[in-house]
Amino acid sequence: MDRSARQRHLTLAVAATAATAAAAAGVWVLRHVDPNAAGSPLPGCMFYHFTGLYCPGCGMTRALHALAHGDLAQMMAMNPLLGLLIPALPLLVLQGLGYRLPLPRRALAILGNGKAWLGLLAAFWVLRNLPWPPFSWLAPG
């Protein structure tokens, strides 16, 4: 194994260890602290607090809390975008580290396209603030 490959594997190992530790700490907090409870130490969305509009991340803490408790339906009700982000994030990290993923080229092109992600976030942001169904179902709750 050449030096650059060893360095890449070391980088991946360090990143995976840090991500695992952060995820474990996050799961522990979400298992022991309820963000839905009054007086919760977990902060709410500042954008929503100041504007009354939902941002793409609104409901993410409550969605992760539901996921930590195994409630997938509640997770999707709080922030359906999380269902897409959870499998995509590790793939994006691996692709960014230079690993060849066993996915079709079209899927890799979409996954690595920053403009597509920005478009998705912008569309999700606008649609979840529309007051009528089915778009109102994208709002947290």
Image: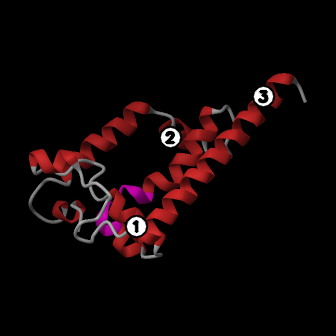
Q: Total number of numbered labels?
A: 3
Q: Which mark is residue 7?
A: 3
Q: Where is residue 136 shown, x and y percent of the image?
A: 16, 62
Q: CA distance from mark 2 to mark 3?
A: 25 Å
Between disc 2 and disc 3, whose residue precedes? Answer: 3
Residue labelled with disc 1: 65
Can you say which quadrant of the picture contains the N terminus?
top right
Of helix, strand and loop, which one carries label 3? helix
Badge 2: residue crowd in 10 Å (few <14, some 14–19, many ≥20): some
Between disc 1 and disc 3, whose residue precedes? Answer: 3
Of helix, strand and loop, which one carries label 2? helix
Bounds of the magenta segment: 76-83
What's the residue at 67%, 31% (across, down)?
98
Relative height, residue 111 to residue 40 (above, below): above
Residues 2 and 50: in front is 50
Q: Where is residue 31 shown, x and y percent of the image?
A: 46, 70
Q: CA distance from mark 1 to mark 3?
A: 36 Å
Answer with left or right where residue 126 lies relative to residue 80. left
Mark 2 touches mark 3? (CB < 8 Å):
no
Badge 3: residue crowd in 10 Å (few <14, some 14–19, many ≥20): few
Relative height, residue 138 to residue 111 (above, below): below
What's the residue at 42%, 32% (across, down)?
114
**The disc labelled 2 sits on which kind of residue?**
Leu
